[in-house]
């Protein structure tokens, strides 16, 4: 069982928006603004999509956005494209070098 | 652009030691800004787990659940860092990734990963 809770699946049609949640506790997600989101495609290196809750690394489309409220962080993908179909994992710093991950969400573009 | 590449045996026998190396290219492992991390996904396709991190000075952090079996080391002359996991069981079968980490554990970039199967 993962430390952070994500829905196992999410889906949307091309052009739609989808939001994936990541729920932790006050000791991790709620206590630090260091939530990241990663995209995993088969046979490719995982990719950082969002860091520090809502910041986008260079090269990540602005269709990807992040937010946080209390102990729950969210990743929103707007204007869904076929290439967005992948597994998405959240992570949170939890103090003292401790890093926690979510169980992952499989995003399907219908 | 910094790249990382994992290498090592893809098959390890139960009770033996898993050994992997991550080679960093197009950048220095001796950067004072970053740490270097090992992460695994077990079984492949399931949740991620941070195994531990190392700084170029050799300072380490290990996941408490694995601490008794894990050793992470760094070789700055070869721009590599390594993972050793002892007394492996089938539960250690996983995709193992290396990645660069900042202080707050933002992991970027990652290596492509290497699948390690524990089986006799």
Image (spheres, grey):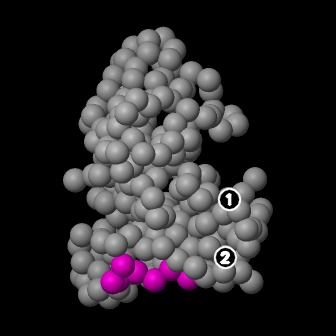
Q: Do the residues labelled 2 and 1 touch (CB within 8 Å)?
A: no
Q: In this view, does A73 lie to the left or right of A45?
A: left
Q: In this view, does A76 lie to the left or right of A55?
A: left
Say which element carries label 1. strand
Q: Where is residue A94 in the image (x, y as percent from the top left)?
A: 42, 55
Question: On the image, which quarter does residue A63 sit in?
Answer: top right
Tag 1 subunit: B
Which residue is painted at 53% across and 66% down in the image?
A: B37
How many residues crowd mark 2 within 10 Å: few (<14), some (14–19), many (20+)? many
Mark 1 sits on what residue? B3
Q: Where is residue B34 in the image (x, y as percent from the top left)?
A: 66, 63
In the depicted structure, whether residue A85 falls above or below residue B57: above
Farthest top residue? A15
Mark 2 sits on what residue? B56
Q: Can residue B54 be seen in this view?
A: yes
Q: Quadrant of the C terminus of chain A?
A: top left
Extent of the magenta region: B67-73
Q: Is residue A28 left or right of residue A44?
A: left
Nearest the viewer among A36 and A110 is A36
In the depicted structure, whether residue A55 falls above or below residue A17: below
Identify the mark nearer the N-term, 2 or 1: 1
Please check the rendered image and state whether residue B9 is part of the magenta-colored stretch, yes or no: no
């Amino acid at each position: 069982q993962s430390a952070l809770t994500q829905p196992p699946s999410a889906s949307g049609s091309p052009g739609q928006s989808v939001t994936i949640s990541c729920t932790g506790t006050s000791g991790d997600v709620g206590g630090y603004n260091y939530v990241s989101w990663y995209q995993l495609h088969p046979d490719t290196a995982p990719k950082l999509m969002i860091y520090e809750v809502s910041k986008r690394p260079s090269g990540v489309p602005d269709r990807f956005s992040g937010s946080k409220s209390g102990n729950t962080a969210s990743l929103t993908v707007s204007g869904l494209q076929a290439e967005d179909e992948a597994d998405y994992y959240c992570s949170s710093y939890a103090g003292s070098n401790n890093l926690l991950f979510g169980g992952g969400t499989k995003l399907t573009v219908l | 652009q910094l790249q990382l590449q994992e290498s090592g045996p893809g098959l390890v026998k139960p009770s033996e030691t898993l050994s992997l190396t991550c080679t960093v290219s197009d950048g220095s492992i001796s950067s004072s800004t970053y740490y270097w991390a090992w992460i695994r996904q077990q079984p492949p396709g399931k949740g991620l787990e941070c195994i531990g991190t190392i700084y170029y000075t050799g300072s380490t952090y290990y996941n408490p659940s694995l601490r008794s079996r894990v050793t992470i080391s760094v070789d700055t002359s070869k721009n590599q860092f390594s993972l050793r996991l002892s007394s492996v069981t089938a539960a250690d079968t996983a995709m193992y990734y290396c990645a660069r980490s900042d202080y707050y554990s933002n992991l970027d970039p990652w290596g492509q990963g290497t699948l390690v199967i524990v089986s006799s």
